[in-house]
Image: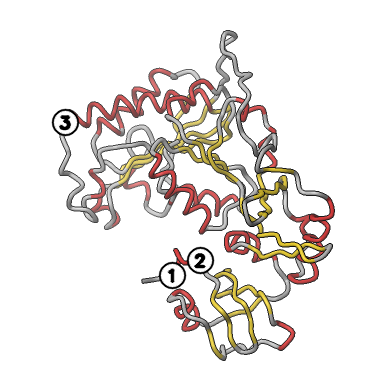
Amino acid sequence: MASAPGSKSTQLAAITQQNSLIIANELSSSRLKTLAHNFRRSGISNYVLTHQDGCDFKSIKNQFDAILLDAPCTGEGTIRKDKKALHNWSLENIIKISQLQIQLLQSAYSALKPGGILVYSTCTLSREENEQVCQHFLQDHEHDMEPVTLSNFFPNADVAVTENQSLKIWPHFFDSEGFFVACFLKKEAIEQNPNKNNSEIVPFNYIQPSGYWSVPESHLLHDYSGFMLDYFGFEIEQLKGQYLLKTEKHAKILWLFPEQLSHPLFQSLKPNRCGIKIADVFTKGNTFKFRLSHEFCVAFGPLFTAKCIEISANELAEIYKGKDLTGPQSLSPPSLNGDAILRYQNFVVGLVRVMGLRYKNNLPRELIAN
């Protein structure tokens, strides 16, 4: 519900292995850009970013299997890494932000399905933002929400358990930053509001393509399927989602978007960004040619069975410095000329262009170390 910069959202994506749709919301426009960048560089495909007040989710009833509310807070727990964390600290700010936290929890409660899990966390240590907020929430929903114990969440977690079975992690417990996390189970459904109109049509070109977006013709998808199978040994039938083609001034770009975008939820929830760029599309005679994107290779490269090169730690360091590789330890056969996937310990690093014994670095510039 408050996702940027995205460490927990990308961890959720890693845990679910692209098999769940992650909706990551952020109110701040500038932080939303950072969140989108972190999803792209992590190779995550099955996600939707939304840009709205987390309190707005109260109008979406009983829709989500799980909700993470990593709530805005005063940040007392981060002082070990940031000495400026308490510069704007005041009791007045604690009281003010705790009221917002209660509102966000109530919004999350409304949007959560019966049987769903709600996780509430902060990086602060004040009781007003942690235990008291949770106690207030449980008092309001004593018949349909119950705390889930976290005493066995990780080794020795029991030393940090509070009276509501949440965890309050003081820095001296585990030589860490300060943190609070609570977990709740929703037991009963709330009534739909008969006066609420949820039939608003979303102005979202990804669902109803128009303008710059179109459904790719079958000939293009046929060539794309053949390219992936012949070149990388990858069957595109493994991918779930809907293909769309974006036409720009000098290029066409093939995208893969989550198949869940047809869900009625997206009639009331307005996506801001979603999907993953597959490739730039070029025409050569009557056929289409494709240049894969970095994020697509990171997302699905582990499934490629051909044109994959394992590199050493030293070679990995050179790649992240923006350098090409000359005469790598694992020399490629002549047939490997062209685009290939670099891997380090089976993790995808990115694309290179193999030209004899030279591997031309195609890592995105924003990932190059200065």
| Amino acid found under the numbered disc labelled 3 | Leu
Please tell me whether mark 1 sits on a helix, a strand or a loop.
loop
In front of the other: 109 or 198:
198
In front of the other: 309 or 17:
309
Q: Determine the residue positioned at 71% across, 64% down.
A: 290
Q: Are marks 3 and 2 in contact (CB under 8 Å)?
A: no
| Amino acid found under the numbered disc labelled 2 | Pro
Mark 1 neighbour class, 10 Å CA radius: few under 14, some 14 to 19, many 20 or more: few
Distance from label 3 to label 2 (Cα)? 45 Å
Q: Position of residue 326 (x, y in %)?
A: 54, 89
Of the two numbered discs 3 and 1 on the same chain, state the one appearing first in sequence: 3
Q: Determine the residue positioned at 61% across, 62% down.
A: 293
| Amino acid found under the numbered disc labelled 1 | Ile
Q: What residue is pinned by disc 3? A: 91
In front of the other: 131 or 363:
363
Q: Residue furthest top?
A: 195
In front of the other: 186 or 4:
4
Of the two numbered discs 3 and 2 on the same chain, state the one appearing first in sequence: 3
Please tell me whether mark 3 sits on a helix, a strand or a loop.
helix
**Which image quarter holds the C terminus?**
bottom left
Q: Are marks 1 and 2 in contact (CB under 8 Å)?
A: yes
Q: Position of residue 222 (x, y in %)?
A: 83, 57
| 168 lies left or right of 144 | left
Please tell me whether mark 2 sits on a helix, a strand or a loop.
loop
Q: Is residue 276 above or below residue 139?
A: below
Label disc, if present, on residue 137 of the rendered structure: none
Q: Position of residue 179 (x, y in %)?
A: 31, 45
Q: Is residue 304 above or below residue 154?
A: below
Q: Are marks 3 and 1 in contact (CB under 8 Å)?
A: no
Q: Position of residue 221 (x, y in %)?
A: 79, 55
Q: What residue is pinned by disc 1? A: 368
Q: What residue is pinned by disc 2? A: 364
